[in-house]
Amino acid sequence: MEEYYLHSKAKLEKYPNVRVFHQSSPDFLRDFVEKYRKDGRKDIIFVYLDAHFYDPTLPPEKRFVVLDELRALNGFENCIIMIHDFDNNLGHITYDGQPMDLEFLKNDLLNVNKNFKFYTNEISGCDMYNEKTILDSGMVIDFETLDNVRFGNSTPRLNYRGILYAVPDELGSEFTIRKIKNY
């Protein structure tokens, strides 16, 4: 982990508005929420969670890091949460036969904000980027990112990923994502 931290810190040091933290994501989120509250902030924070970490050696309730991340946000109502790799029939994460779906996440999400409204993406709203479209766009891209794009485009199972959006208010019709039942 130290290696990734040092690599990221070196890569991002030229951006004065970016800070790199050497913490687990649940610890970072707990510290962030504590400082947010201490500072008396009221702005809405966008939280992006990518659920790739899984450790089969841990007890079942500790295997999905996304659950610990959500628990670190417990009671933090001033946020919008986006969870990547969500099971909505697009590409998603399943470990030990447990898909990362709304039934699995809902209690921890509702402990963040009992009024959350849930939405998800659909394939019709997915843009597919590949090496050519990225290079043609003029974006500056490093080898690791380009290699990840190549890998993601190597099989249809990896092309499109499910996303869950937990938002504090209903979204208008200008959003092209599908509402999921609320609790």
Image (cartoon, rainbow, N blue to C red):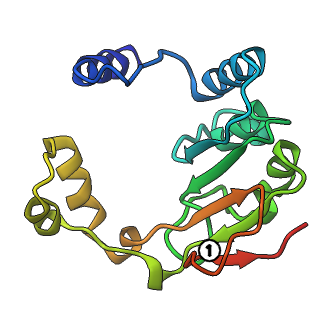
Q: Residue furthest bottom?
A: 124
Label 1 sits on a secondary structure element that is loop
* Disc 1 packing (10 Å; few <14; some 14–19; many ≥20): many
What x and y, as percent, mark residue 156? 35, 77
Q: Quadrant of residue 160?
A: bottom left
Q: Is residue 17 above or below residue 46?
A: above
**Is 154 left, or right, of 119 in this rendering?**
left
Rendered location of residue 47, percent (x, y)? 60, 42
Amino acid type of the residue that numbered disc 1 sits on in the rendered structure: Asn
**Looking at the image, residue 24 lies above or below residue 134:** above
Residue drawn at (79%, 36%), measured in percent from left and top? 76
Q: Image quadrant for the C terminus? A: bottom right
Q: Give x and y (percent) for residue 166.
A: 71, 57
Position of residue 69 measured from the top left corner of the image (x, y, whole percent)? 68, 36
| Residue appearing at x 35%, y 74% in the figure | 127
For residue 168, what is the image quadrant? bottom right
Q: Is residue 147 above or below residue 7?
A: below
Q: Which residue is mark 1?
A: 88
